[in-house]
């Protein structure tokens, strides 16, 4: 399959799937390093001080001229992204184990993002210079900031399953998100690590991966924890005897 054909298929798939998606208004969003907590970055709405987001004048996304060296001055070209880092258990161990990898975690909630940075700071990972946390909507960060072909791998472990049907629209693992993942990943070995304890969300997620034009599930539901590193949620769930679903997905390009 040619690259042009692949791109066309991805665009058509996202467009068709997007017909059922809720249209989200476009706003100005700014990326700023936290002045008090090293390693924490905020990607949040621009406001007039009243918490009401300022809409972009043309109704189109507010794109930023972002380079990974803005976040990691010493990065060597190897970038990985964790979607939903929680309290930072995986990120801390993974970044500590791989000082030559540069990994950005993400959390919408400020408290959890700050907690993850504090954990990494205590372990010396932040001073090591290869880890940072993004507080904000990572979908829009990928879409509007991250340049194509710049990420080596994605990790997504035990995200909020939003179990109530009326909240399913809040789930991040959807076709438009995978479109951005595919765009951001570098050519070559393009891996997405997925894990959850929620059976229904896992089934929907795998259906979404299977239907996406450039996805191939390499290991379905039986993958081991990435490099033996378990998250805090996973350790808790395993003690409770819950089934764990871990998969490894490749994006072909």
Image: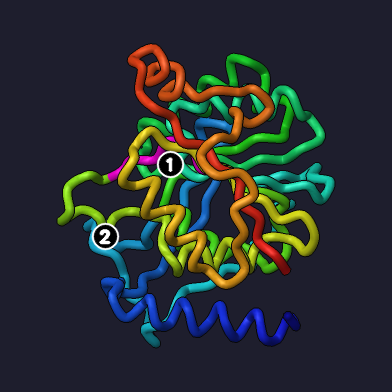
Task: Work out which quarter of the rendered image holds the N terminus and state it.
Answer: bottom right
Q: Is residue 212 left or right of residue 94?
A: left
* Residue 34 in view, yes or no: no
Q: Secondary structure at mark 1?
A: strand
Q: Which mark is residue 157?
A: none
- Badge 2 or badge 1: first in the primary sequence: 1
Q: CA distance from mark 2 to mark 1?
A: 18 Å
Q: Is residue 93 left or right of residue 212?
A: right
Please, is residue 194 above or below residue 146 in the view? above
Give the x, y percent position of residue 8.
Answer: 60, 86
Q: Which residues are magenta?
A: 156-161
Q: Which residue is mark 2?
A: 169
Residue 63 placement, left or right of 168: right
Whether residue 249 is situated above or below residue 52 in the rendered picture: above
Q: Which mark is residue 107?
A: 1
Q: Position of residue 253 (x, y in %)?
A: 73, 69
Q: Main secondary structure of the magenta part?
A: loop
Query: Can you tell which of label 2 and label 1 is closer to the viewer?
Result: 2
**Which residue is rendered at x = 26% and y = 60% of the image?**
169
Write the residue at 59% across / 30% down: 91
């Amino acid at each position: 399959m040619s690259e042009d054909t692949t791109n066309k298929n991805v665009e058509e798939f996202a467009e068709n799937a997007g017909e059922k998606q809720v249209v989200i208004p476009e706003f100005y969003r700014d990326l700023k390093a936290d002045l008090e907590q090293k390693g924490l970055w905020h990607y949040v709405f621009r406001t007039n001080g009243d918490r009401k987001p300022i809409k972009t004048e043309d109704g189109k996304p507010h794109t930023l001229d972002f380079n990974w060296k803005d976040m990691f001055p010493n990065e060597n070209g190897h970038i990985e992204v964790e979607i939903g880092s929680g309290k930072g258990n995986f990120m801390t161990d993974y970044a500590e184990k791989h000082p030559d990898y540069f990994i950005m975690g993400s959390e919408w909630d400020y408290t959890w993002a700050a907690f993850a940075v504090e954990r990494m700071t205590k372990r010396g990972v932040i001073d090591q210079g290869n880890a940072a946390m993004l507080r904000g909507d990572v979908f829009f960060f990928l879409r509007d900031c991250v340049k194509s072909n710049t990420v080596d791998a994605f990790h997504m472990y035990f995200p909020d399953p939003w179990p109530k049907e009326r909240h399913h629209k809040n789930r991040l693992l959807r076709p438009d998100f995978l479109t951005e993942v595919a765009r951001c990943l570098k050519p070559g070995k393009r891996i997405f690590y997925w894990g959850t304890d929620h059976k229904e969300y896992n089934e929907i997620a795998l259906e979404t991966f299977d239907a996406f034009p450039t996805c191939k599930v390499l290991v379905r539901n039986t993958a081991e924890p990435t490099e033996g590193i378990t998250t805090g949620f996973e350790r808790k769930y395993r003690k409770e005897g819950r089934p764990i679903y871990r998969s490894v997905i490749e994006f072909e390009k």
